[in-house]
Amino acid sequence: MNPNTAQSGPALNRRPIAAPSSSPEAGASDLARASGGGRSLLGRALAVLAFDRTALLGFVLFFAIVAAALLAPVLAPHDPNLISMRDRFRGPSLTYPLGTDELGRDLLSRLMYGARVSMSVGVISVGLAATVGSLLGLIGGYYGGRIDTAIMRMMDGLLAFPAIILALAIMTALGPSLVNAMIAIGIVSIPSFARLLRSSVLALKEREFVEAVRASGATGGYLMFRTILPNCLSPLLVQVTVGFANAVLAEAALSFLGLGVRPPTPSWGAMLDMGRRFLTQTGWYSTTAGAAVFIAVLSLNLLGDGLRDALDPRLQHQRERA
């Protein structure tokens, strides 16, 4: 048998083998094509949320609260700080849809402006906690050793105190104000983000795609911020919704205790506290503020559960097989 003839058949079915990527950028792009399927993280989440009724309800409720906060100067029927003593403790009516408080101020207008306070505290405090906590967790999980031990013991020290007690201590030291409330809530929320990112990094840093990018000559900073961190965004995004809900509750608690925003700035927690004092005279005062906090936290929890289900790879594979 002719050797050339014997080898000609198999040779026709051979495919060229792609050369390994010679740069971290090429490795990262190959990984994105292999794992992402051409769809972004946000695109996959929105596609699943569109068919999840509870998550969609949470999104609609939260969007309504954010819209009311942003458009409060346009939508509010009255000035939230306008005092009218002759209209104090009025019940719901066409003029005052949710009634008035002890100074005759419109409760609906104050709820809308109070939403601006809660949303701003949530954005700033969660942004602070996510940035600092993610950075600490990323560094600790990647480098390990004494660096990881020092960071985690510091986080354990913060977690040793109940969150509200630690926030109260920080507020007592800094003084009552909106900015200090943001700082206090942000510091209290740092450990949850740090521990989440650390566990994700420990699970990813020895994976094959990370080793491939490391073998191509990538630096530690590139591996952390360009290779590992993008693969931690799914649990981080879910934790943001949970942290946002906790921030709304913490701000309401601090304002309820008199350590949040100062009067006459509207705040849901301060309205709860003031309504409690006049509970025998009017029941809708505290009810409206409590309902606002309840709806805000419920919407974020529903949205967070939906995002968790949408971004969980195991559930995603089950949906694809179904």
Image (tube, helix red, strand yellow):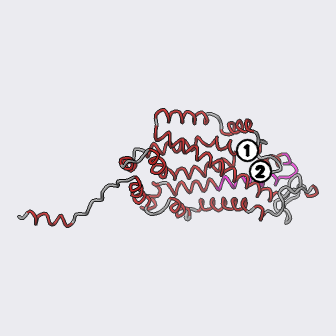
The kind of residue on which mark 2 rests is Ser
Question: On the rendered structure, is 222 left or right of 192?
Answer: left
Judged from the image, the secondary structure of the residue bearing numbered disc 1 is helix
Q: In the rendered image, which residue does mark 2 sit on?
A: 267
Mark 2: few/some/many CA within 10 Å (<14, 14-19, 20+): many
Whole-percent x and y of residue 190? 60, 42
The kind of residue on which mark 1 rests is Ala
> Which residue is more in the foreground, 17 or 46?
17
> Which residue is more in the foreground, 304 or 140?
140
Question: What stretch of residues is rendered in magenta?
Answer: 277-299
Whole-percent x and y of residue 116? 73, 55
Magenta stretch secondary structure, dominant: helix
Does the magenta-highlighted stretch encompass residue 282? yes
Label placed on residue 253? 1
Whole-percent x and y of residue 137? 52, 42
Q: Residue at x 58, y 40 (%)?
A: 191
Question: On the rendered structure, is 261 left or right of 231?
Answer: right
Whole-percent x and y of residue 267? 77, 50
Tally of marks: 2
Q: Residue at x 67, y 52 (%)?
A: 297
Does the magenta-highlighted stretch encompass residue 276? no
Judged from the image, the secondary structure of the residue bearing numbered disc 2 is loop
Question: Height in image: 88 above or below 262?
Answer: below
Question: On the rendered structure, is 85 left or right of 26?
Answer: right
